[in-house]
Amino acid sequence: MTTTSRFFAQGGSESESEDESDFEKEVESNNIRYLADLPDGEFCCGMDTKRVVKPRKDKRFEEMTNTIENMKHAMNINDCVYLQETFEKLNKHLEKVMKITKSVKAPTLYIKALVLLEDFLNEDKVRKMSTSNSKAFNSMRQKLKKNNMQYQEDINRFRESPVIEDDDEYEEELEEPTDNVSWEMLFSLDHEEITWNMVNKKFKEIMAARGSKRRSARLKLKTGETHVDKLMDLTKIAKTPAQKLEILFSVISAEFGGLSEYMPIDVWKKCVVNMLTVLDILVKYYNIVVDVTVEANEKETSKPVDYDGTIRVSGNLVAFLERIETEFFKSLQCTDPHTNEYVERLKDEPMFLALAQNIQDYLERSGDYKGASKVALILVESIYYKPQEVFDAMKKMADEEIEEGKESGPISQIVPRKPTFAGSSRAMMDTLISFIYRNGDERTKARAMLCDIYQYALMDNFVTARDLLLMSHLQDNIQHMDISTQILFNRTMAQLGLCAFRVGMINESHSCLSELYSGHRVRELLGQGVSKSRDHEKTTEQMLMERRRQIPYHMHINLELLEAVYLTCAMLLEVPNMAANSHDAEHKTISKNIHRLLEKSEKQAFTAPPETIRDHVMAATRALTKGKFQEAFEVLNSLDVWRLFNNRDSVLDMVKARIKEAALRTYLFTYSSSYYKSLSLDELAKMFDISESQVHSIVSKMMINEELTAKWDQPTQCIIFHEVQHNRLQSLAFQITEKLSTLAESNESAMESRNGDVGLDMSSRRKDNSQDYEAAASGNRGLQKDGSSLTRGVSA
């Protein structure tokens, strides 16, 4: 029976031993001479064999030395294939050595090997090589060039002052103060007794323990305690501001990790507070600069408070802010909007705005205007959809929360915890957007312009909003932008259509909304729902991406109101158009949707009382075609969605006037040529309850636009109709025109299907695709543009 010797167990040997009894006899006979004669770490394993036991660090170092010798031999015989293999093996040995010694710096022996290898590969002498050797030589050059980038400083330092290696140099080089104290002892020490190395060592332990159960067990976490809690404890004893900043960045990154749906609200608030603490440090110690281009460097974080030079810490404030905004956005998406929880979540928005404003101020002071413009866009996207009443309520709520915070006790703060609001949302938008136009990139400017147009449309300033859109050419280039920007464009067009309707511009309103309703994807285009198609089944990833694009409920545009506005505009435009072309079966329709709905309702054997918005509009359309304008208005007036307008009464008065005008036009188109030779002005005014001046204006416009072949008889105040007889040449010309129009439409449809666009108006495309946002913002606001050029839908 063979057993392991007690001596071998203490020495850490893993080899087999002799029988215990034989070994005892051997010890007695030899009088344990090997203990006296041999050096430490060596012993006899029998009469004929010797074994040498070395520390693991020495063993790894020896392996690296042997590999380097093999590399030198490969260089002497010009064997690049073997050289490539030994180089890869050398890098593996380096990882093992640095892992054992827990060092962040490569040993000098490895740096010397890189220098020798670099000199060998950069020699100009001509070598005769085989094909495989030549390929390995070129591949080795590329690998070495890429590998040496991270050790360039050490290589340059070695070339300036080369040193001679010995066996003990590696150990001396990596010998560092351990400062190995337990967690309990660390927090029991006075602050003066704690060193930077102690905190840094514990910081590395925590970062290495993340994701490792074995290393996490060494931290001895209490019940409910996490790695983030340990890191927060370290921030309290950090020796330098830069070290505290580095730990805080790790805390924030750890808080973002391991999220299934969205960040819990309490963790999100802690993350915002940590970011504000970071800003306190950066404002207090102005020589500390956060730079995303630099790598983490212990030399920078170890610099004391009174250091005069610039201290660079690796981090990205804009990326952290964008992630915080995303988590806030996701929490609103995943919360039921009809609960108090959703309302309470919205109350956290002023805290986020305060953080964004402080980051923007810091970036402007540090000269990072590009990053500051991205933060300004985040602020714009948090404000643009809010009416002035909501903006005032948010400002009042922020003031109340600050007062409650002061009552709870004073807190050491440097940057303000309260957002700064301008007198109005429009003034705040102007300041932010002007900054973005000066310093932002193309995407940032485009999104800022869309938010600006949305804000003007929300304030019923249609002319300014329309001019900004036309002068920026966004409708020409939007299909090349990302989907979230396309959704923002669709939302802007929807709000622009509602604005045009509120101010009484029916044609412009229909032009803005027609593309959204060209298909059955309004919810998807506005980011307010997911469309379900029978022809195309979406994958799980596509469904997940669509859900992430959804707009939170408080930012929604009411789809019922939007549908009511669109169908009302289509009715007011299409009913007179159908009357004017009643004898032309191939006439150009203004709204195909209203035609389809009208045909569907006419096929029904029994017409039930209207229930939905479409039913109400169809009932009003049938009444309007028969000249019953009062009945048509009463049907539309019964809709409840009109109460969503702040100026409900004025909007309904406008709708009533437009219905009367449409009824008059329909009447004139129907009876002008076949039933009457003349009509009295006062009779028309009494019939449609319109003033004579309005009737005169409407009829005169119809005559000017050649919609009505008639003239005014001023003495009798009558309209004299003319019957027009076209000759054969004119009739043939009209037929050719209609065929060319049909051919152009079919060609347009073919181009749309080929390019993948939905409902594009090819006639409205501009040759000049350049965008000038500042010119659009400062240009003439009173230009009279044709609303038809706004009809440009986007398929999100």
Image (cartoon, rainbow, N blue to C red):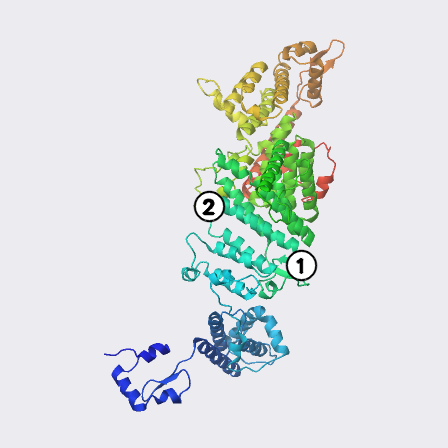
Residue 623 visible here: yes
Closer to the camera in the image, 124 or 484: 484
Task: Tell me which label, 1 or 2, sits earlier in the chain.
Answer: 2
User: In which quadrant will I find the C terminus?
Assistant: top right
Looking at the image, is mark 1 or mark 2 nearer the viewer? Answer: 1
Query: Considering depth in this image, is 620 or 191 the residue closer to the camera?
Result: 191
Density class for disc 2 (Cα within 10 Å; few <14, some 14-19, many ≥20) is few
Side of 701 relative to 47 (left or right): right
Tag 1: residue type? Asn
Q: Quadrant of residue 769?
A: top right
Residue at the outermost left position: 1
Badge 2 is on which residue?
261
Quick one: label 1, few (<14), some, or many (20+) residues within 10 Å?
A: some
Q: Secondary structure at mark 2?
A: loop
Work out whether residue 739 or residue 321 is closer to the camera in this orientation and state it.
321
* Above/below status of 751 relative to 729: below
Q: Position of residue 721 (x, y in %)?
A: 68, 14
In which quadrant will I find the N terminus? bottom left
- Residue 492 on image: x %, y %: 61, 36
Position of residue 693 in the picture relative to residue 502 (left or right): right
Give the residue at mark 1. 287
User: In the image, 575: left or right of 40?
Assistant: right
Q: Amino acid at mark 2?
A: Glu
Position of residue 419 relative to residue 65, above or below, is: above
Residue located 60% across and 53% down the image: 278
In the rendered view, tell whether residue 302 sits above or below residue 263. below
Q: Is residue 602 above or below residue 495?
A: above
Q: Which mark is residue 766?
A: none
Give residue 705's position: percent from left, percent from top: 69, 23
Does the rendering let one see residue 627? no
- Cα gap from disc 1 to disc 2, whole angstroms: 39 Å
Viewer-closest of 682 and 163: 163
